[in-house]
Image (spheres, grey):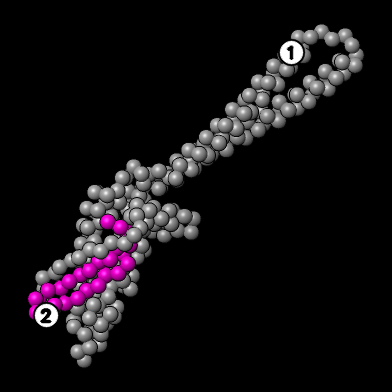
Amino acid sequence: MTERKVRVNYYYGKEELYEIIKKIVNKRLSANEREVVEENRSSEIARKTFKYNHIFSGILKCHECNENMSYNKKYGGYNCINSQRGEGKCTDHFVKEEYLLEIIKNNLKVYIDNNINIEELYKIENKKAITADGYKKELNKIKRELQKIENQVELMYSHDIDDPINKRNIKSLMRALQKRQQFLIIKRSYVEGLKERNEIEGNLYYESYKEEMDKMLDLGYIDKNFIESLVEKIIVSEDENLNEKKIDIYYKFKN
């Protein structure tokens, strides 16, 4: 197979790239994906994924016959299905997998550097902050009510009441206030425990989120799901007269 001059064109869709990337990261961090995420952290397994799953299968199309391009193990790349069948059914398109990965990674790197606010991507939809604020409000509410009960108890102790009926009423009210006070103290302890656990879980989630997002933005691991999420299709064509190969990459995100 003779080497030809290669011309690469890029076309863009309508989605925001950072929204697509956030969806990929959240999917990788979801409960049913955790095992996959752990496996993907191994570079050896990542290489096996490239080798056996052929990340561009189903995305690469031949311009001349509109058929898919399938992986050819012998050459480490893809060529038109019809050309593999012989009988001159199509031209012998061929593109190496490593070459496609390289041009897409380089193009995405430039796009990310120029168009994405990385700090924006690290906002986890503000869920942790909202939840923490909710705990704070509840604790303040409990604190105010406990202070109110304490003031009422002090007020009752400060009055010397001789009337037996009023004394019984005061004792009954005192018992009710003390019961409410005990309940609020237990509730405060419970809410504080929830807040602490939530903060720990939130921090752990954020660390995992940031780790995955860093890898994603650094393009350190590209799998089939990543490519399918970002790329609509790739069309390969040959111009025999110009001895030129043309690769048209259609992204799902907008420019």
Q: Nearer the viewer, residue 8 or 34?
A: 8
Residue 72 lies, in percent from the top left, at: 24, 77
Q: Is residue 168 left or right of residue 38?
A: right
Q: Quick one: label 2, few (<14), some, or many (20+) residues within 10 Å?
A: few
Magenta part of the chain: 231-255
11 falls in the magenta region: no
Q: Amino acid at mark 2?
A: Glu
Q: Residue furthest right?
A: 164
Residue 3 against residue 186 in the figure, above or below: below
Q: Which residue is disc 2 drawn over?
A: 240
Magenta region includes residue 242? yes
Would residue 173 be seen by someone viewing this image from the given angle?
A: yes
Is the C terminus in the top left, top right, bottom left or bottom right quadrant? bottom left
Q: Is residue 50 visible?
A: no
Percent across and percent down for residue 119 are 34, 42
Q: Characterize the magenta stretch by its predominant secondary structure.
A: strand
Secondary structure under tag 1 reads helix
Mark sitting earlier along the chain (1/2)? 1
Q: In this rendering, is residue 133 above or below 127?
A: above
Q: Which mark is residue 155?
A: 1
Give the CA separation, mark 1 to mark 2: 99 Å
Is 148 situated left or right of 162 in this image? left
In the shown orientation, is residue 245 left or right of residue 194?
left
